[in-house]
Image (spheres, coloured by chain):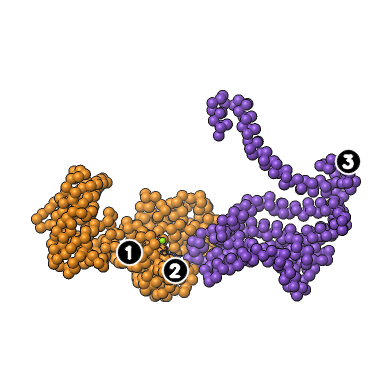
Chain colours: A purple, B orange
Amino acid sequence: MAAVARVKVRRPGTGRVIGDRFVGRALRIYLPLLVMLVVTLFPFYWMAITSFKSASELFDFSVSPLWVREPTLDWYRHLFTQTNFPRWAFNTAIVAIASTLISLFCSILAGYSLARLRYRGADTIGWGIFVTYLVPPTLLFLPLTFVIRELHLFNNLWALILTYPTFLIPFCTWMLMGFFKGIPRELEEAALVDGATRIQAMVRIAIPLALPGILAAALFAFTLSWNEFLYALIFMNDSLVKTIPVGVTQELIHGDEFFWGELMAAALLGSVPVAVLYSFFVDYFVAGMTAGAVKG
Amino acid sequence: MASVTYEHVTKKFSTDTTAVDDLSLEIRDTEFMVLVGPSGCGKSTALRMLAGLEDITAGEIKIDDQVVNEMPPRDRDVAMVFQSYALYPHMSVFDNMGFGLKMRGSTRSEITSRVKEAGRILRLDQLLARKPRQLSGGQRQRVAVGRAIVRQPRVFLLDEPLSNLDAMLRVQTRIELQKMHQRLGTTFIYVTHDQVEAMTMGDRIAVMKDGVLQQVAPPREIYDQPVNMYVAGFIGSPRMNFLPVTISDHKAKASGLELNLPKAPGVEHGVLGIRPEHFLPNVSDADAAIDLKVEVLEVLGSDQYLYGKVGSDDLIVRVDPQLKVDIGDRVRLGLDMQRLHLFDAGTEKALF
Ligand SMILES: Nc1ncnc2c1ncn2[C@@H]1O[C@H](COP(=O)(O)OP(=O)(O)OP(=O)(O)O)[C@@H](O)[C@H]1O
Ligand SMILES: [Mg+2]
């Protein structure tokens, strides 16, 4: 405000004032942003350049490690031909997509019914689901291991597709419940009077209006299952059924020997789908976070 | 076209909130029935039970002699206009209006022709492709009405459809709704808390208070013969003056006047009711008279209202706007004995 006031007093358009304003903005806004950006992006940068460095350059400490002199795609070629990485990526995608779809289907129904239908115990069930979400996987994996063994699902992708919803459904249900509560009840009542059944009112009115929330929930679910480590580590021992997080950490590190080039290449490729999804849906994602936060 | 019957209908939301209490009301075929009452008196609840949006705690609701208590809303063939309009935000005006027909399995061409027809009647032809958020309040209201009329339902339910409009538009839309009722010849049930809407629109008016039906009658009768003090005070603006009186035989005595009642009411304590418009400018010997000490003047062009005191009681009087009065003046006015009401001070019921 001070800068604006000064413009009025002086002759408009003098370089000095504009300079002042620019410097002020830079100091107050862009400098802190830049610092944050550097801190958060540096690991990614390191990961990226490492994956393009040749073997000799990787361990040559006489040159600056901050850039690449002779970029090479060797590690990527190696990753795709010498390891099971393509298989892991495929597995991860299948598991993430399937468990996201299953969780969404269940959470939409559960969230809708908890938000809309009046039945005995609805509130208790709502709280119950929230508490379930708070139970950490580190506790839950023990009983789940028994279940998976009884079902003979070790080394089978179904083991993950079925266990991921145990933490995805409570989370998504809770989030979608807030979204459905935010939609005026009268819209569906109007649809009911107009001749719709309860299911039609849900499908044609509530779900289209909750779409931002559903997309956000889908994004959360997809990210969580894409990155999930613990269950995948326990249930998947055969190299061909591993997911990226497990495959990379188990098979690209042998004892104390780190295959840095492949590791970094795999980590970079593994984070691409999630990054792409977020960049497309970032607005929905933010909307989802806040809606889930204020509605309870 | 249908008649609607409420038989001893009660709605309790919990053990201690009774929204509608033993409501019995018959609405005739093609009638325009207005449910009126203050906020929270259970008007909407009564309407929503008929639409099937609320369970009925006790009693029966019938449409054309068929009990509908357990019937899902979609099978009742009623249409409802909500106070908030409840337009589907993600659909165009066309789709909003056609939704009910689509749900009932009408063909595409039938939907198009019926929506176009309704759009023409409601002057929405140019707006059919728009989304609700791109419409003004008045246009939204018309879409809400349009959504109801394209379906050609047996009964129209309207829950305060005008309360979100400005005063001018409200009067205009009120007249349009009346025309619509005449044109369609369908039963209308109209909820409002506005007594002017009730008086101008209703074939009959049902006045409610705290979930209890007070009186059902044509507007004229409600105005002329209110059954109790509540109805007398609710209908009419400014409201009826109430003067507590003590009665002995034919004589009624208030703080600032004394008069002979046409007949002995047989109670000791009463409340005299007289509307502001029922005072006479000239006092003849036969009439009772009052001496009003004027405290506030309101000149509205067509009318002039005097606010003042008779004895220790407040009084509002309508007089000719040409009458020259100043604050502090004492004005002598006659009482129209034909128009006088007397209520039992204890039960508040009308004695005459
Ligand atoms: N879903 C509900 N749960 C509990 N109480 C309710 C519910 N809906 C209405 N009520 C209560 O029932 C009573 C009647 O409500 P209703 O909405 O019928 O009033 P109304 O006459 O339509 O008032 P308004 O003119 O303000 O719309 C009120 O006391 C209200 O608090
Ligand atoms: Mg209401």
**Residue linked to disc 2:** B13
Chain on which label 1 sits: B
**Residue linked to disc 1:** B207
A157 versus A57 height, above or below: below
Whether the residue carrying mark 2 lies under 8 Å from ligand 1 is answered with yes
Which quarter of the figure has residue B225? Answer: bottom left
Chain on which label 3 sits: A
Q: Mark on residue A148? A: none
- Mark 1 element type: strand
| Quadrant in which ligand 2 is drawn | bottom left
Looking at the image, which residue sits at the far right? A56
In the rendered structure, which amino acid carries the disc numbered 1? Val
Query: Residue B169 appears at what percent x and percent y?
Result: 38, 50
Q: How far is mark 3 from mark 2, CA to CA?
A: 80 Å
The nearer-to-camera label among 1 and 3 is 3
- Mark 3 element type: loop
